[in-house]
Image (cartoon, helix red, strand yellow):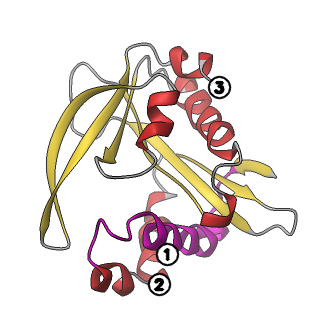
Amino acid sequence: MIIRKAMENDVKGIAHVHVNSWQSTYAGILPHHYLASLNIETRMKNWQRNLKMLHNATFVAENSNGEIIGFASGGPEQTNDPHIQGEVYAIYFLKAYQRQGLGKKMIKAVVDELMKMGHKNLIIWALKDNPSCGFYEALGGQAVAEKSVKMANIELLEVGYGWKDIQDILNHL
């Protein structure tokens, strides 16, 4: 596997992973009709915009065929919380590539980049029912906040996993 910084021509691969991983990860959490309505073209437009941001720390994972099988993205914390500097916005892999240790390598790439940006601490938000919450806990993340979010016309709970010192996450890799 190769993990590298994302480029603008990666948007289709990132969008493919984004849609497919949501459909597998959130089945049973979000309504089927909502997940079925997700489309690659819309995600491609979002990722074209995201990759042009100056503060963007987005990485992709490629398999041996050069296909994008995962991505992670981070940057400044998005709610202007005065106590939190960095945030991992997303980390997703196609189902066939999950639970193989790639998530740790991907988190390391994003965290290293966030540290270069000067971020001293970190938060990752995840739906409370997301089966990947245990991954963040295994990396030393502590549940530091909760918030209600509306998706697919239903109220869901998100948990913010935090690290007071961004280097602590590296100690768990």
Q: Quadrant of the C terminus?
A: top right
Question: What's the residue at 13%, 72% (across, down)?
Answer: 153
Report how far apart the C-alphas of labels 1 and 2 lie in the structure: 5 Å
Question: What's the residue at 41%, 80% (across, down)?
Answer: 42
| Picture layout, residue 160 above or below residue 54 | above
Q: Which residue position holds label 3?
A: 173
Report the side of 168 relative to 86 (left or right).
right
Q: Check contact, mark 1 vs mark 2: CB within 8 A.
A: yes
Report the magenta residues as a range: 5-31
Question: What's the residue at 52%, 58% (across, down)?
Answer: 51
Q: Which mark is residue 41?
A: 2
Q: Position of residue 56 (x, y in %)?
A: 49, 46
Mark 3 nearby-residue class (10 Å; few <14, some 14–19, many ≥20): some
Per the image, label 2 sits on a secondary structure element best described as: helix
Q: Earlier in the sequence, mark 3 or mark 1?
A: 1
Q: Nearer the viewer, mark 3 or mark 2?
A: 3
Q: Position of residue 68 (x, y in %)?
A: 70, 65
Name, please, the residue furthest toward the right.
64
| Picture layout, residue 145 above or below residue 156 | above
Q: Position of residue 143 (x, y in %)?
A: 29, 28
Report the side of 24 relative to 58 (left or right).
left
| Picture layout, residue 56 above or below residue 32 | above
Report the side of 77 relative to 61 (left or right).
left
Q: Which residue position holds label 1?
A: 44
In the depicted view, which residue is nearer to us: 20 or 128? Answer: 128
